[in-house]
Image (spheres, rainbow, N blue to C red):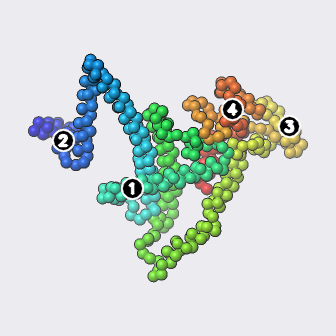
Amino acid sequence: NNINHISEFLQDQNLTLFVKMIDRWNGVAYGNTPTDKIVCIFFGYTIIILLCVWYLSRTRNPYGRTVGRAAQKVLRQQGIVLKVAFFVAIELLIFPIICGILLDLSTLPLFPDATPTSRLEFYFESPVTSTFLHWFTGTAFMFHFAVFVSLCREIVRTGVMWFIRDPNDPQFHPIKEILERPVWTQLKKIGASGIMYSAMIVCGLGSVIYFIRYAFNGILPLQWSFTEPISDFPADLLVFHIIIPVTVTLAKPKRLFRTLFENWWHITSHHLRLTSFMFGGRHYEEEGTHVRKTWRAFFLFLKAPIIDNNAIESDDVVFVRDGGFVRAPSYDAVPVEPGKRMLIPVNEDGTLIDPNDAPVGDDDQPGYTIVYIPPNFRARIILFLFLMWFC
């Protein structure tokens, strides 16, 4: 009765938000749904634990202090278990579901009469089925993205993709990292992964589908009927069970795609002058530009290094190097220190330009190699990723 009086008073004061909160609290206390029961049990155990902690922190009984220390140890262990379970649930459940939802929203133009409202109605009608489909789709996307990253890792030299942890690395222990690292550090890591996956889905996939939907009429949505047979004779089943497996076995599309992708990577890296960074080694034709000798004094004034006469193609042309050399990781499992540069500028012989970039004697570590990077290196990498998406 008192709660009802308070609700009536708040309604008279136009405080509808507080009215809803009180009604929700009243529903938790007297409701019979599983959610109401779980919330009541949670609050009950929380109050009991807080009372026990308050009593054990104030008692002077030696036996009570012993019990308090044991209880603290148990709570600390249970907190570790809950921490691991929390992050494992995020990685294996919540993260794939979010990816599945983004994939669903990004592919809406593919299906006729598909809208966010229809997807939401389907969720309310069949929440378990909808959640499972989104989780399965997101998990499949994450798996294929991991396969694609592994393919890229096999093409380039080791150390190019140091910023993405290799799950096959024997030094990679995700459970150990969860136990040792602070919660905030783990949440930032998961947040960065979420931004990367979201950008891949929305920009890489959704932008293409929505562009085709609104730029070209009559293509989307797809008018494919999977329920009606093509003919009375089950030709589609024969194709799926006989022709397609034989074709895949003979054509080997995976090997073909890898060959094409590897050739594309080499050609694009060469045109962007990134071959040394991507594959290692020296590529003198990418380390500068050819200019006429009449500009030689100008480049000397700018202190631009000039290669000797062996690199001169004609009597009137000289080769001027721009860009520079960096010390880059030579394997993917290189330890990353926060705030430390991973690409450190060096001279051609490998000596550090700025001694403050690394500790003394750190130059000779086997985990690093010397590669050439052209000017505007960051813009070239962004252009490389854009061309990869575009192609």
x, y (%) of residue 362?
Answer: 68, 28
- Vertical placement of residue 69 versus 368, above or below: above
Among the 4 quarters of the image, the one containing residue 79: top left
The amino acid type of the residue labelled 4 equals Gln
Q: Which residue matches tag 1? A: 132
Q: Earlier in the sequence, mark 3 or mark 4?
A: 3
Query: Can you say which quadrant of the picture contains the C terminus?
Result: bottom right
At numbered mark 3, what does the secondary structure look like: helix, strand or loop?
A: loop
Q: Is residue 129 visible?
A: yes
In the picture as drawn, the residue positioned furthest to the left comes out as 1
Going from the N terminus, do you reach mark 1 or mark 2 first? 2
Q: Residues within 10 Å of mark 2 (few under 14, many from 20)?
A: few
Name the residue at 46% across, 58% down.
107
Per the image, the residue denoted by label 4 is 365
For label 1, the crowd category at 10 Å Cα-Cα, with few meaning under 14, some 14 to 19 and many 20 or more, is some
The reply to whether residue 272 is in sight is no
Label 1 vs label 3: CA separation? 65 Å
Picture residue at 83% right of the left edge, 33% below the top = 297
Residue 29 circle label:
2
